[in-house]
Amino acid sequence: MRSSVLPRRLPDPVVADALASGRALCEGEGSLARVADVLRARDQVAREFFDQAAAKDREAFDAPDASAAYVAALARLLPHRKLAVDAGTGDGALLDVLAPAFDRVIAVDRSEAQLDRARIRIAARSYANVELRKSELGSFDIQDADVVFASRLLHHAPRPVDLVKQLARIGRAVVIIDYARHDDESMRDEADLWLGFESEELRRFAREAGLVDIDVIRLPAAWCGKGKDAHLPWQVLIGKRK
């Protein structure tokens, strides 16, 4: 009978002993002490990639279509639209949605080269309500934005769950657009540290960040643009701070 089976939450003594032995071996040879160095090295790869990519690509942006007008009209139905944060704005592509929708937008990136690209976009679009900041998210001082967005940023993070926690401290609501799990190893050349995430992984990250009302939805391929990652499966994580 099922009642005679030990609850799954109880630790398996064999597994626990194996984990303890493995940890002791790693500590003895110094492997655990090198974990932080490995994470820093992974992070540096992403920094260098985006600095170089932005330096090679500084052409002016084409004039936008009429979608910004539609977004501005629809946004009047939103209850909270005073401040949005675009975390890891890159060249500012998401600003074409956020600037027409919110009264104020703060776009953050740690790469000055990427921010230069975003400045070109802002000038071309005449976005007077956008403020650019060069900053690491962990040192960002805003905690009560209506919404914080992170578009295709999570797969570059050495520790994705830590990034979600940082986002949850910034915004009362969090919207993360990223890839579902895939097997395209060529994306490693785009400084991707993770080949997407299972939906349950995203939900776990959100729960560990203290978010509630969590939802994960897949996006139709027709909505994913024409970039190098258009062939990948995209998904959206939405959660709210308690």
Image: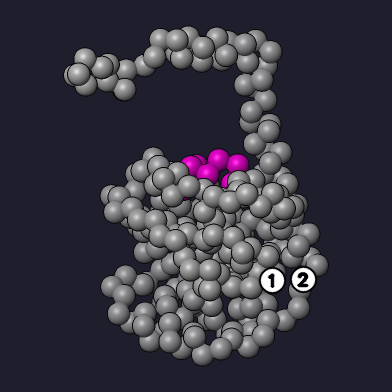
On screen, residue 48 versus residue 21, left or right, reads right
Q: Residues within 10 Å of mark 2 (few under 14, many from 20)?
A: few
Please state the extent of the stretch shown in magenta in the rendering. Answer: 157-165
Q: Is residue 196 left or right of residue 118?
A: left
Disc 1 is placed on an element classified as helix
Closer-to-camera residue (119/182): 182
Q: Is residue 160 magenta?
A: yes
Colouring used for the render: one colour
The structure residue drawn at horizontal position 43% and vertical position 87%, both measured from the top left corner, is 70
Tell me if residue 118 can be seen: no
> Looking at the image, how many numbered discs can be counted on the residues?
2
Tag 2: amino acid = Asp
Q: Is residue 21 above or below residue 241?
A: above
Q: Is residue 41 above or below residue 72?
A: above
Disc 1 crowd rating (10 Å Cα; few below 14, some 14-19, many 20+) is many
Please name the predominant secondary structure of the magenta segment in the image: helix
* Numbered badge on residue 57: 2
Q: Residue at x 55, y 40 (%)?
A: 159
Separation of disc 1 and disc 2 at Cα?
A: 8 Å
Q: Is residue 40 visible?
A: yes
The disc placed on residue 88 is none
Task: Identify which amino acid the numbered label 1 is placed on.
Answer: Arg
Residue closest to the eye, 236 or 12: 12
Q: Earlier in the sequence, mark 1 or mark 2?
A: 2
Q: From the image, tell me which residue sits under label 1.
A: 117
Which is more foreground, mark 1 or mark 2? 2
Q: Going 32% across and 70% down the picture, which residue do you hit?
A: 80
